[in-house]
DNA sequence: TGTTGTGAACGAGTTCACAGCC
DNA sequence: GGCTGTGAACTCGTTCACAACA
């Protein structure tokens, strides 16, 4: 009962949305391994979360599990892909073909997980015309024309920080409403445009903090919390199947 | 009063820790621009958060602000770098020099923000001996020797997913207690080891969900929430200074 | 019996609003 | 007057524990 209406996309908690892709990856692994059905416990383990959280997450989709049995793997894949909007392979524009841009352009994982890199852009004349993974690098001034032709809805910024805001402005101007930003800076965008940020150095700095904390625990701080490192985010569970490669 | 003891590293909320690097980046920008002091409002804007959150975050460090004036930029940089453990430049091992690994090896941002890539590893014989950004690629079997020599405490995994768990096991075996994982899979590690994960496809899938949601809003779902896209994470604030480049 | 779906308790994180201080 | 530091209210997310059900 209370069949959660599968139209209420706006009601999905953000934290749940962030985990759905992980469930999807785990489900694909299970499907390849020949499982038709999986319990919340099994899927949770494969995805690296606990089963209560997984069940609550799935219940938000109006879930399709069977008590006493589990979830139908194929059906759940279909459901999650629908919710994430992956049924239409979205066209992505990648701006900045430096070191990181090259790697992203060649990353097979995008194609296999619902995306198509539709065009590459840069501002450096030396790069224009170069072909990377079958795609030609265009000058950023061609963005309006190509964005329209290819129906670009998502942009990836892999430029130096100094150029990122200008690029974001141009992306927004051609109608892009989702941006993945690899440049280490804050972007200012109009309401209605989503920005997600990935900063490699920040991730390392967070790890560094935990290293520092662990080291400090040895030197007996005044607070006697000498227990074995509370709150460690040690993942558990079987490491899932072999998804596609990250590197070469 | 109640001078929060700056030894209580364990008491910092995780969410605060995750934002400190962003504050640090903003502070460096302000310092370069010649500011000696900054208000919570100013720093918050530069870092893309609101000022109440910033003040609460800083208060956890036992903060060094002056009422009516603001924060001393240089002092705050020093404090945050200390807390994050960046005063000692940590040695990082990078495993997997494929597409992404190459980009990471050449990423100047690591060096400028407190880290030193001390060694590169791969399992592919074709890659061994190659020199990337001044570093030679070693066979993964040399990890124990080099990890000891270089005092490696953090490992970065940029291998295909199928190899990631084995690499993680080897890193843990040589005493690494912090891992940044770019492979799209769940890692299983012992307690006391921190794993952070960056999955590029997942970020795009989250953006895709929001695109889908925005598009669905047009087709008038039964729930009459036709307001202008609630919960968009539009960043605001000046885009900070030019930090180092991400790309080439 | 085994497993899902979910109300209820709990905890973490954010925002508010203002006292305290320069 | 202006700005920080913080208790208190509130929101969001997680975990528990169990009723509903195949």
Image (cartoon, coloured by chain):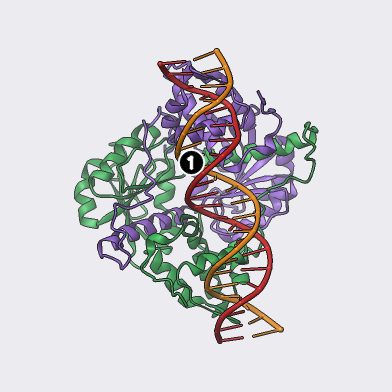
Chain colours: A purple, B green, C red, D orange
Q: Nearer the viewer, residue A173 or A231?
A: A231
What is the chain letter for disc 1?
B
Q: Count residues near mark 1 (Cα–Cα under 10 Å), then give few for <14, some for 14-19, many for 20+.
A: some
Quadrant in the picture for the C terminus of chain A: top left
**What residue sits 74% from the left and 34% below the top?**
B216
Q: Is residue A132 above or below residue B17?
A: above
User: Pointer 1: what residue?
Assistant: B199
Q: Nearer the viewer, residue B14 or A181?
A: B14
**What residue sits 79% from the left and 36% below the top?**
B218
Residue B208 seen by the camera: yes
Q: Position of residue B11 (x, y in %)?
A: 41, 61
Q: Is residue B150 left or right of residue A143?
A: left
Q: Position of residue A8 (x, y in %)?
A: 70, 33
What SS does tag 1 mark? loop
Q: How many marks?
A: 1
Q: Is residue A11 above or below residue A139?
A: above
Q: Position of residue B169 (x, y in %)?
A: 28, 39
Q: Is residue B240 left or right of residue A35?
A: right
**What residue sits 54% from the left and 66% below the top?**
B56
Q: Nearer the viewer, residue A47 or B106?
A: A47
Q: Position of residue B187 (x, y in %)?
A: 37, 38
Residue A108 seen by the camera: no
Q: Quadrant of residue A239?
A: top left
Q: Nearer the viewer, residue B124 or B86?
A: B86
Q: Is residue A109 above or below residue B22?
A: above
Quadrant in the picture for the N terminus of chain A: top right
Tell which residue pokes out farthest to the left in this image. B145
């Amino acid at each position: 009962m209370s069949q959660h209406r599968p139209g209420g996309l706006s009601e999905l908690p953000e934290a749940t949305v962030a985990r759905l892709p992980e469930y999807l990856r785990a489900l694909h692994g299970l499907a390849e391994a020949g499982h038709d059905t999986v319990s919340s416990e099994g899927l949770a383990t494969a995805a690296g979360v606990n089963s209560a959280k997984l069940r609550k997450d799935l219940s938000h989709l109006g879930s399709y599990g069977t008590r006493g049995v589990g979830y139908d793997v194929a059906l759940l894949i279909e459901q999650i892909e629908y919710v994430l909007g992956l049924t239409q392979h979205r066209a992505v524009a990648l701006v900045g073909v430096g070191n990181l841009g090259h790697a992203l352009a060649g990353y097979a994982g995008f194609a296999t997980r619902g995306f198509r890199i539709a065009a590459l852009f840069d501002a450096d004349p030396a790069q224009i015309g170069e072909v990377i993974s079958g795609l030609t690098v265009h000058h950023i001034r061609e963005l309006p024309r190509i964005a329209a032709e290819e129906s670009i809805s998502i942009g990836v910024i892999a430029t130096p920080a100094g150029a990122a805001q200008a690029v974001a402005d141009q992306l927004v101007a051609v109608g892009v409403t989702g941006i993945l930003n690899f440049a280490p800076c804050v972007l200012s965008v109009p309401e209605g445009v989503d920005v997600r940020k990935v900063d490699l150095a920040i991730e390392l700095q967070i790890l560094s903090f935990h290293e520092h904390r662990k080291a400090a625990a040895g030197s007996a701080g005044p607070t006697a919390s000498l227990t074995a490192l509370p709150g460690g985010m040690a993942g558990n569970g079987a490491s899932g199947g072999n998804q596609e490669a990250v590197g070469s």
